[in-house]
Amino acid sequence: MDVSQYLEMFIDESKEHIQTLSDELMVLEKEPDNIDTINEIFRAAHSLKGMAGTMGYKRMQKLTHDMENVFQEIRSNNMKVIPELVDVLFEALDAISNYLDNIIESADEGTDDNQNILDALAKIVDEGKDKETPEEETETKESDENNDEVIKEEAIKEKEDIDNSDDTVPYKNIIFSDFEKKSFGELLDDGMHIYGITVFLDQNCILKSARSFLVFKVLEEHGEVLKSVPSVQDIEDERFEFDFSVVYLSAEKAEVIKKAIENVSEVDKVLFGNLEDIFAEGAQEKKKDDEKEKKIEEKEEKEEKSIEESDDTKIKTANVGGGQALVKEKPKEKKQSKPNVGRTVRVDIEKLDDLMNLVSELIIAKNGLVSINAEQNSEGLSNNMFNEQIEYLESVTTNLHESVMKVRMVPIETIFNRFPRMVRDLSKKLDKKIEFHVTGEETELDRTVIDEIGDPLQHLIRNAADHGLESKEKRIAAGKDETGNIYLDAYQVGNNIVIEVRDDGAGMDIEKIKNKGIEKGIITPDIAEYMSDDEAIELLFTPSFSTSDTITDISGRGVGLDVVKTKIEELGGSIECHSVMNEGSSFIIKLPLTLAIIQTLMVDLGDEKYAIPLGNIQTIEDIPLQDIRTVQGKEVINLRGKVIPLIRLDAVLDVKSNGFEPESLTVVIVEKGDKVVGLVVDRLVGQQESVIKPVGDYISGSRAIGGATILGNGDIALILEVNALF
Amino acid sequence: MDKYDVNSLQNIEVEDEGVEYVMIQTGNELYGIDIAYVDNIVRYQKITRIPKAQRFFKGVINLRGEIISVMSFRLKLGLSEIKETKSTRIIIVKPEAETQVGIVVDEIKEVINLKANDIDKGESSDSSDAKNSYVDGIGKYGDKLISLINIKNLIVERGTSNS
């Protein structure tokens, strides 16, 4: 069967399980005896194994199976969690992630068997078991002794059966109580037959319970199902692997029924046998049951070594006790409580983009109505009803927009939760003790931003661990705790999300940065002299600026903070850095909450209209011409004690001046981090919701243009990328 | 049934139904654009200037809610710009999948069909270099000669270097 349509689901869910494994392994490292954690890991490994098996990824299945095994042993107290085990498990987790990456790339898991990890896992299990349970071996011996008998038993059985092509015939392992034998035996009158049937579903079958249901339906058309293993309830709940067995009463001939079952799609194989002799022979039954139970034990032994998924059911089948019709679930499933999952729907991001586009169109249409209304009002044709309806429409579109935006919001957790593991690895690699603190994981960001922000953050955290934090010795010498701290905080401020990466390390050596800047020819010694600390730190963001004396494989590859900065600015955000010697450094990233629709201030420049994002605007000032001063050939204003440089937007954007010089200038004060500049505009038009659209293909314009938006009258206004003006 | 279809398709190729071109007049010269690239032809409309764009890009237009960049055919060919008239049109072409660009042309004459033997692929040495790289060949249509434009060269490859 084609499973490609499930690939996406598989990838998503695998990612979740891998994340769970990563999180729980981190906990396990700290609390090796935490039984909840052990159970959680076991479940995640088990689910991954099942999913990988279903999709036919054998290597991934094997690896997860072995992981699961280890935890099976731990759960049954056969061994203890040791630090080496956690290391190997982390390696195994990386290997699984690699498989998944390969699958995402090419729908194929790749060819790496990761034999070294499998061996390491096996070794740890062997050693661990040796220490904890010497009695294990004797058990194996016992079941070995039973082997002969079992084989004999099976040989006899096979002769009696119609279908004896396979030597593992699960239905033969069904165990009947005395009562069942008696009552089933009575039914044998009137030419009825009792059959044992085992149905193997296709390994790729997705809707196992549905297929089983069809099989049962077919069976019920021809006779009566007396007993099923696993129980009907378990089959309905898909608590079985790929096969199930039934005891079946029918007047039909075996071939007819077999054929009918085989006609159900996705049925791989049907084993069929006559069980009448079981009910005929009453005397030997007790003995037989005992033998069967021994056989069961032997089977279980085998199963522990085999990785065939379908085998798992046989344990269940075999576990049916003498007098019980109930199926004993495997212990691992017994404790599985239903996970607490909110009611969610997975939606393709493209569908959300479509929805978003439609909302955008709606807002443009609404803006059109608003502008028509404004015109009519100015002509004295005011219409109250129309006004009201437009206001109503405005509130609906605003809410609709907000809702759609919210749908696109993803907690930043999805990015944050991969960092604890990274810091752990870094800490081992760098031989530094690092405590990692995360807050605000629940803060939500637009999905498109989330996808892009991971790498820059990773870069900053690596930097903090590698360059920010000092070595243990240096920390102790500086009178600090030998454990360094890295903080990752996310929170919302107004229309922005702020993400902070902080460390309590050495801080930045301003002199060193300046020297490096001079060395690289970015600044001259004269300039360096007068540079403030913040300005010096700003140098870090210039391309290929790396102050680390040695290049390590963790950071300092030459792609530096400038790449981080570029990425964040692409997202419409900004980054700044503060540092105090011996106290640490912090990087503060500010990102806009939404990307596609923003509140803007419309301004006129000559005959053209431009939109300035409200998020950037601090205040709007009216500055008399005589208040403009010139410092080093640049125009500045002194606004409430602060000197603010002026930018003549018409000059920056080559706008044709209308040649009219007013007595005072309209200045829009915009900010970027701590910096403030004043943008000189001709006229303010008003506030408007703007749908950001790309400026079109092949055209390359000024960096100061971040996009375009369509106005209510169909005209286009360009949106200023304020960050590019600084 | 399937077989029949395949055969009929092959027949089409063999017979050479030719290629349709949109014939454009610029000054005294005629140019042809392969209709396969043409998405739409619209009347001239207000163009919003983009600061510091390539010189031959006039700016962007709003085409039913989509913002589309627009270049001037005249400027691209190194001719002087003229003021738009009643016959000025913007041809919206798709040089590549998922991309659109408008080309402002003086006048669109008609859509013509040229067969392979109507087209002279040879290099004509008297035309200037800039022009030449955008011209795939010369089509003969009646007594008219039509320079056939290579859209991809016109927009994609030389798209940014001439600014």
Image (spheres, helix red, strand yellow):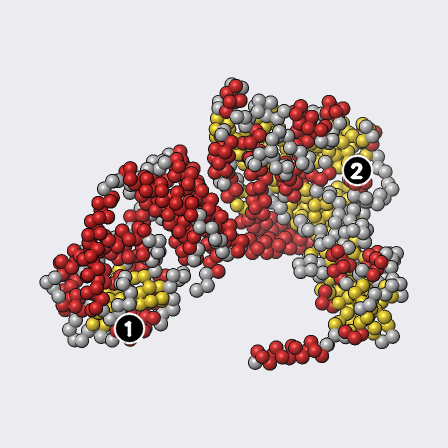
Q: Which mark is residue A257?
A: 1
A303 displayed left or right of A558: left
Q: Residue A552 in the image: state x and y as whole percent.
A: 57, 34
Q: Earlier in the sequence, mark 2 or mark 1?
A: 1
Q: CA distance from mark 2 to mark 1?
A: 88 Å
In this rendering, position of residue B5 left or right of residue A677: left
Looking at this view, is A354 or B95 the one in front?
B95
Mark 1: secondary structure: helix
Q: Nearer the viewer, residue A219 or A490?
A: A219
- The vertical placement of A256 against A335, above or below, is below
Which mark is nearer the camera, 2 or 1? Answer: 1
The front one of A456 and A307 is A307
Give me the chain letter of mark 1: A
Residue A237 lies in quadrant = bottom left
**In this orientation, does residue A442 appear?**
no
- Which residue is located at x 81 percent, y 70 percent? B120
**A158 w.r.t. A404: above or below:** below
Q: Position of residue B68 (x, y in %)?
A: 72, 56
Q: Residue at x 78, y 51 (%)?
A: B161
Note whether A152 is above or below A20 in the view shown: below
Considering only vertical position in the picture, is B87 above or below A383? below
In the picture of the structure, the residue carrying the numbered disc 2 is A648
A586 and B154: which one is in front? B154
Q: Amino acid at mark 1?
A: Ile
- x then y, percent, for residue B149: 79, 64
Provide the secondary structure element on which disc 2 rests: strand
Residue A255's quadrant in the figure? bottom left
